[in-house]
Image (cartoon, rainbow, N blue to C red):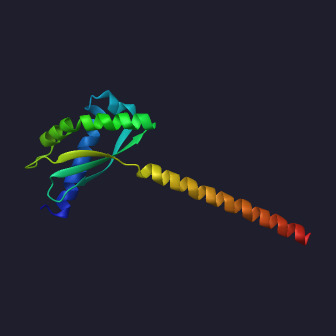
Amino acid sequence: MADNRRVSRVSSLIKREVSQMLLNEIKDDRVGAGMVSVTDVDVSGDLQHAKIYVSIYGTEAAKAETMAGLKSSTAFVRRELGQRIRLRRTPEVVFVEDRSLERGDRTLHLLNQIRDTHREEDEEIDNLEQEDLG
């Protein structure tokens, strides 16, 4: 089992290399349907499995198409990683869609709605207080 520092180093190497592949080398047109970026890579402690989290910008159809393209290019990505990163065994690669940015954006939107509602209520209370005093 690898130590945490090694797992972290391998994770960041995989993230860098897969990002480069997404930019220049994956030829599947479906991958270009949505704007894709690698947000994180989780590597197991034995360095045998790598979950590559990708954020995809676009419509739901474009996201589904992009994920299908990524899943079909898994063998290519693994082979390329094996050539670029010197490990005894190249980890099995799985692409996972990362929706945390969307959830964060939705949370911010809801918080802003709550803030605006409270502002409107405060303004109404202030107006009523001024009418009572005046």
Q: Residue 104, how many percent across, how many down?
A: 47, 54
Observer-nearest of 68 and 134? 68
Classify the position of the N terminus by image quarter: bottom left
Observer-nearest of 105 and 11? 105
Q: Residue 75, how many percent across, how many down?
A: 18, 37
Relative to 63, is 45 above or below?
below
As drawn, the residue found furthest toward the bottom would be 133
Q: Is residue 130 left or right of residue 58?
A: right
As drawn, the residue found furthest toward the left would be 88
Instruction: Look at 30% across and 34% down and name the residue there.
Output: 69
Q: Is residue 120 left or right of residue 48?
A: right
Relative to 117, is 133 above or below?
below
Quarter of the image for residue 78 reads: top left
What is the number of callouts on the image? 0
Instruction: Look at 25% across and 42% down and name the residue there.
Output: 18
As drawn, the residue found furthest toward the right would be 134
Q: Residue 94, how many percent across, how many down?
A: 24, 45
Q: Is residue 99 left or right of residue 50?
A: right
Observer-nearest of 92 and 35? 92
Relative to 41, is 31 above or below?
above
Q: Residue 15, how many percent across, how many down?
A: 26, 47
Classify the position of the C terminus by image quarter: bottom right
Quarter of the image for residue 29 reads: top left
Quarter of the image for residue 117 reads: bottom right
Relative to 57, is 4 above or below?
below
Instruction: Look at 66% across and 57% down and name the residue there.
Output: 116
Instruction: Look at 7% across and 49% down and name the residue there.
Output: 88
